[in-house]
Amino acid sequence: MFEYAPAVALLPFVSFLIALSVGSYMPKKGAFAGIAATGGSLLLSVWAFVTVSGGEVYNEPDLFTWVAAEELSLSFGILIDPLSAMMLIIVSLVAFLVHVFSLGYMNDEGETGLPRYYAELGLFTFSMLAFVYASNLLMAFMFFELVGLCSYLLIGFWFRTESAASAAKKAFLVTRFGDYFFLIGVIGVIATFGTAQFAGQESFPVLAEHALVDGETEAMTTFLGLGEQAWVTLLGMLVLGGVIGKSAQYPLHTWLPDAMEGPTTVSALIHAATMVAAGVYLVARMYGFYALSPTVLTFIAFVGGFTALFAATMGVIKDDIKRVLAYSTISQYGYMMLGLGAGGFVAGSFHLMNHAFFKALLFLGSGSVIVLMHHEQDMWEMGGLKDKAPATYYTFLAGSLALAGIIPFSGFWSKDEILFEALHYGLGNQPLLLGAYAMGLVAVFFTGFYTFRMVFLTFHGDPRSDTARDPHPVGWSVKVPLVVLGLLATFIGFVNMVPVADLLNMDIEFLHQWLDGPEETVTSVHHYEELVHDAAGFEAADIGPYLPGALSLGLALAGAGLAHMLYNVPDPEPHTEKLGNIRTLLKRNYYQDEYQVWIAEGLTLPVARAANKFDRTVVDGAVNGISRVSLDSGSRLKQVQTGVVTNYAALLTFGLVALLVVVGLYGGWF
Amino acid sequence: MLIETLIAVTFVGSLVTFAAPNRWAGELAFGISALPFVGGLVMYSQFDGSGNALMGGELAFEQSAEWITLGAYSLNWHTGLDGISMPLVVLTTVLTTLAIASAWTPIDERQSQFYGLVLFMEAGLLGVFAALDFFVWFVFWEAVLVPLYLLIGIWGGPRRKYAAIKVFVYTNVASLAMFIGFVALVFNLPIETFDLPTVAQALANDRLQAPGWTSVSALKTGAFVAMFAGFAVKVPVVPFHTWLPDAHVEAPTPVSVLLAGVLLKMGTYALLRFNFTMLADVATQYAEVIAVFAVVSVIYGALLALAQQDLKRIVAYSSVSSMGYVILGLVAYTTYGVGGATFQMISHGLISGLMFMAVGVIYNTTHTRMVTDMSGLADRMPVTVGILIGGAFGYMGLPLMSGFAAEFFVFLGAFRSGTLSGAPVFTAVAMFGIVIVAGYLLFAMQRTLFGPFRLDTDYEVGPAPLHDVAPLFALLLLVIALGVAPDLFFDMIRDAVNQMPLVEADLGGGY
Amino acid sequence: MALYELPEWAGLAPAVILAATSLVLLLVDSIDPDSSNRPALAGTATTGALLSLAVTGWFLVAGVGDPDGRGVISLFGGQLVVDQTSLLFTFIFASVTTMVTVASYDYLRGHAYQAEYYSLIMLAATGMATMASSASLATVFVSFELLSLSSYALVAYLKDNRGSVEAGLKYFLIGALSSAVLVYGISLVYAVTGSLRLAAVAEAAAGTELVGVLGLGVLMVLGGFAFKTASVPFHFWAPEAYEGAPAPISGFLSSASKAAGFVVAFRVFTVAFPVEQFLDLGVDWVFAVQILAVVTMTLGNFAAATQNEVKRMLAYSSVGHAGYALIGLAAISGPNSDLVLGAGMMHLLVYGFMNTGAFLFIALAEYWDVGRTFEDYYGLASRAPVASLAMTVFMLSLAGLPPFGGFASKYILFMGAVNAGFWWLAAVGAVNSALSLYYYSRVVKALWIEEPSDDVAKVGITEQPIGIYAAIVFAAVVTVALLPAFGPVTETAVSAAGALLP
Amino acid sequence: MAPPVEYYLLLSAAVFCIGLFGILTRRNALMFLMSVELMLNAANINFIAFSFQHGNLTGQVFSLFTMALAAAEVAVGIGIILVLYRNFQDVDVTKAATMRW
């Protein structure tokens, strides 16, 4: 069936073309084209999923040859293995639901430019899907960039407002900065290994493995006189640049909160399944490469842990419902990074999946809330929506529980596994990971707090505004996606319940088995675990999963409880001024934007202006100076032509005599 | 014979247009320029050359005839195309046709003269890329200057006279330096012709004999420097670039299109043919120095673009930056490097042409190019703005557009260069250009295209006419086509590049 | 057209025809002193010039004077010779004369003494032709004076125009001084060698001990020629003379008379003062010529750069071009110098057409009296497109841009210099030619780019003088055609130069 | 017995310089003309003397040419000086200086 694999990505592309060209003449402005396309992709992905579970792994490195140079040809291929098959479903499902949701969210609002919206949505889905099953790093980079373009377009969808335009620009620019390193990494990888394949015996992770583990150093060429290990580490770091940019990890996270300027549906897509997920997915995709370098792994874990805590603290005091979710996204992707960095390939992927569902759910839910509130996003204007919009409330609640990591909702299982991985390697021989673990653990508390602060402020208590008292109804196209996602958020976690498995001593870690694949390949979990152990040299300490699990659950509940205490009252207080200076610090997001804006406008721009001045005055001045000098000397020189003929005679005679003297001396006559 | 026909048709066409009445000169010129356009495509389809024109490769459409005998020396008419010049010929014909179409709106006086000169320039450009005898090549090389001077001088902006004379004299000085350098080289070779392939092969076989007053290496270096300086002005390489922004800002849109699209490529093409093919050993000897020039051009040019308020100036300076990539690719001496540089010539030709046209269309309706004077144009002219955004992202090197392909090839080749020590560092520094370019283009777009609509010049802004938008669209399609399937050109380019001396075909390494 | 049937002296036919024409015109003048039958007079002169042009062309084609063809003709005991050099330059003189006479048909409307004017032109042309073929210092001096005296008169032809008279005076005074210098130089050379025939001079000079005297003489002779070619420091007359004289005469002098000076210089210095021999003697006249070349082109071009009047700018530029042509002689001490010497000849040939054409455009402007300054020329292209186009051709060709003859000749000249090992001469030339591009383009700018001010625009261009137009268009066509058809020119020039060189 | 030839050289040189001096100092056109004549005659002295010295007639013949041409030159010169006087009411050569630079 894999000959249809290209269609998975191409269907949305077709919908993009349709919506762009004839969208304005279609019913619902091209929405149905998008729905059909994404639905088709979803079906095909499921089919692919089934096929893969049937034991086939599809790795076609050369479907379309981009450059057919005999020495090094570059081409587009498709790799469908358990990981990408899973991701395909996630992406196409979320995209499908977002399309459906848009019917209620965008179309019903008399929005202009809907064809553009659906076209960009289609392109977005196309790029992400193609990125997901890209078979080599170069292709991955290309669609990674296209994803960036689409996010730019969609964030700036309401381009008539200054803030949207600037948010779009910021999103692209910040991620571009990360992609700069990514591109160097891509080129470095190709130049080093002569290939950018992800999977297969000739793939670059395998070659690197040969070089580092088996000592076949001729498998790679290093540059700048670096050793193999160092060079691989450097390449890993470079590629990581792109990841940090796209997955909004510290310090390149600043674009993401602003990205809320886009339509909420777009936020759902970006945060749950596409753009932001791309970064973490890339790490998982080339995990065989990262697993070779403990330095990079630890770095990833640390960045992840730090970001998780850092973002969670900022989420605590936000008043805009979407912003709270934005910071929660950053924090959650921090967890995934932590998991992957801590050698927990399965844990990271697991959380990636869970998060995709519950974050999509939360955003669509918030979207529904925003519809209810006539596009009011400030939580202090809401309250008491629980009874008025039960469907929204309960689904949103499910998502929140998952996000907060309350057993048995999906978020709990994955987050717990991540923390466990970090802990048991940390206690093993990687004390650095303990730091990351600690940060992650603390973040759990804040997560529980801000999540339920959001829930209570939005749905509980008394309505705090007229719109809240009499909200705008929402239609089926809004509710259906919420319900679907709500169920997923609730139950998807059961596919990999490590503690339970350990408790019952049953083999129910389905996701783990799934990712392990039908047979041992270079991309299966088992192989990764070996690498983490042998190449990176991670040693696991022997501890049980219960205590850490209980600990994180306790913290989550504590956070939730605090929120309940403070905000689950009829007429809640902000309480934020109690924080004093910390409050301003948090409101200002630790001044991250300020210094980045300063780098852009306070540093680069003046330098550019100085260069411009230099160019105009010195460089160009030299050019003009030469011409001026020669013209002046010309007008001086012509003064010898006095017009008086006797002077001419004199000058003539003088000239002749001078000539005589010079030549005479030269020829030695006298 | 096809090349000669092309040139002749264009030249005669220019005379005809010159005599035609202003009313329908534009349409006439468009029709005439369609002939070389079709001819170019025919040649592309029939192209059967292989290898490098200068290094004894199989030439397509080769043609040669006696012209002048100068004592023992003979200057002959010799033309032919290889994988490097073929794409440039196509580029020239395509851009000229589109530029003429884009001129219908802005050019509203002395049309027949304008279009006549444009066609004359096209003839010269075709000759430059097709000629294989130095003197013939030089005739065309200089012949391009005259129409350029008049086009800028007559139809240009407020400071057009200054700009015109500046580009005229500046580039002419450069040509003179280059001429003396090259001639000095040839006269010390045991050959009695200025036939470029002969010269190149004689140099490749170290048949250069030093005259009494200097050594072979000194002579080579001197000639290299003279020629490099000469071509660096045309490219332009920092610090010889200051004529470019003036010329671009003052020139009317169609001329800017041709100037950025094709005329700059004359410089890089000549660098590739003369300095980097004939004097490869010198080029590799001073690879680091040249690479510094390249990197400075990239970063410095991008910084300058960042500081501009005039859309045209922004694009103009960004051209300086993009040309820096070309130099970097050339000095890498790898297939991907040199081939990528050549591909970048084509790609930048299309993209910068697209950008200048789009800016021109906006100018036609708003009568301003100042970023500060307008905002929210996307509201009034969605199609144009859409294409402009496309072009801008192409300029930023968005994948699946030609700009990315070209830059990627250059970076890959440069990174892996065996002749340039510290190549990865040079590459990485140069690559930072892609961030800055994104910076200034995004800033400019945000201010002009997005936000609430505002225009300080009181003109009625509506969608642009079709014959303004159509060329833009055609260019955008070409850019995407080349980005998706670079081998349309890159194949023949590689073939020609691989035969260059010192170019490492394989990427080496332990696999 | 079997030539052997003709006697040898028939080789002088071009000169003879010119002389005869002038005599005919004098006859007409003496019969009918105030004849103003313009068609007849101009017609006669033109016919004569054309005839001699035709004969010259025929000889060139037939291979007269070509050592490999019908051989060099030496007449009157070696006083005169007919070789490719003489024929090539006679060709220049004849064509310039033709253009000038045709143009003068309109220019002289309403002037008196037209017959004298034409006969003087023909006499001057005769002088040039004889200069081209004179092989002895005696004939050199005589023909030199013949040219000078008639051109003095021609410059001062507009008797009631102060400019013309002043120009004539200055030209005459400097000319008298220079010819005195020349003849004194000749006398010194004679003193040392006891001979005036060029070849004999070379022989006799061998191993003389009066080096100082000889060197003095050589340099003074050089000075005399420098006057004719308007080379620094003997150029002072040139700007005024060209500016003051009637424009056709300016063209005539600045192209033909200059070329005449060069042909004599080329012949005398190659035949009578061979380089190697005189270097051994310690008379390094090449060094002197190099100095002259550099100074001349630099001063000429730099002074031209900032002129306000187009005519005077052209005058200075003509000085500059004298500097270029001097390269032909200055680089002669290098290897295969026939190339560079021939290049000098080529440049003079092309220059004959483009420069005459330029001055004839000035004549046209004076005829319309639109004024002399650049400002007066603003926007002229819209009112006289054809003439402006031609002028543009001349300017760009003078600046050495394709697709015009000036491009080929200038760059071949530089090529020759580099080839002879004098790359620095070429470099100086390059700098100057870049500067020249600036001021030549000023004219193009004035014609095509600038907007005319109202009072300028008022100057009505009533009629289209057919004669001047014909001459200008002819010059323009030739200037353009000379690039593709440069092959024959180079062959003739190079072989002519080769024949001169020992 | 004729005096040695160097004396003639010196004499002619002296005459030549006198003429040159005249040209450089005099402003009257006619004086200017006479000075030129002096210089020409200086040349003639050389010719005659060295024609005698070398024992051939070339020099003497040439001096005849010189005289004839000198006469012609004077004729043209006088003509020009006449129109000069007519236009500038003066024969001062420095008066006619309208064209310069």
Image (cartoon, coloured by chain):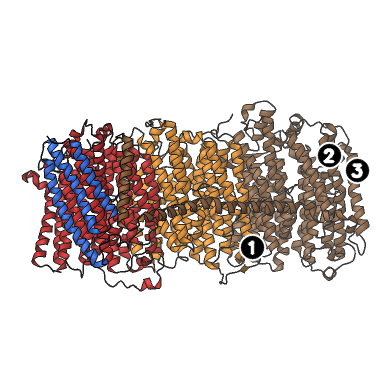
In the rendered image, residue B27, in percent from the top left (x then y), is placed at 40, 64
**Classed neighbour count for the residue bearing mark 3: other residues with Cα under 10 Å, few (<14), some (14–19), many (≥20):** few
Chain where mark 3 sits: A
In front here: C445 or B111? C445
Tell which circle, 3 or 2, labels the residue nearer the N-terminal end: 2
Mark closer to the observer (1, 3): 1
What amino acid does circle 2 point to? Gly
Q: In the image, is residue A54 above or below residue A18?
A: above
In front here: C393 or B347? C393
Residue A557 placement, left or right of B56? right
In the rendered image, residue B162, in percent from the top left (x then y), is placed at 46, 59
What amino acid does circle 3 point to? Ala
Instruction: Write down the residue under mark 1.
Output: B450
State the SS at label 2: helix
Among the chains, which one is red? C
Chain where mark 1 sits: B
Among the chains, which one is blue? D
Chain where mark 2 sits: A
What amino acid does circle 1 point to? Phe
Among the chains, which one is orange? B
Q: Say whether mark 3 and mark 1 are on the same chain.
A: no
Instruction: Write down the residue under mark 2.
Output: A435
Give the residue drawn at x 61%, y 60%. A19
How far is the residue under mark 3 from the one under mark 2? 19 Å
Q: Which mark is residue A550?
A: 3
How far is the residue under mark 1 from the one under mark 2? 45 Å
Residue C200 placement, left or right of B425? left
In the rendered image, residue C265, in percent from the top left (x then y), is placed at 24, 44
Mark closer to the observer (3, 2): 2
Q: In the image, is residue C284 above or below residue B46?
A: above
Task: Please identify the quadrant where the N terminus of chain A is shown.
Answer: top right
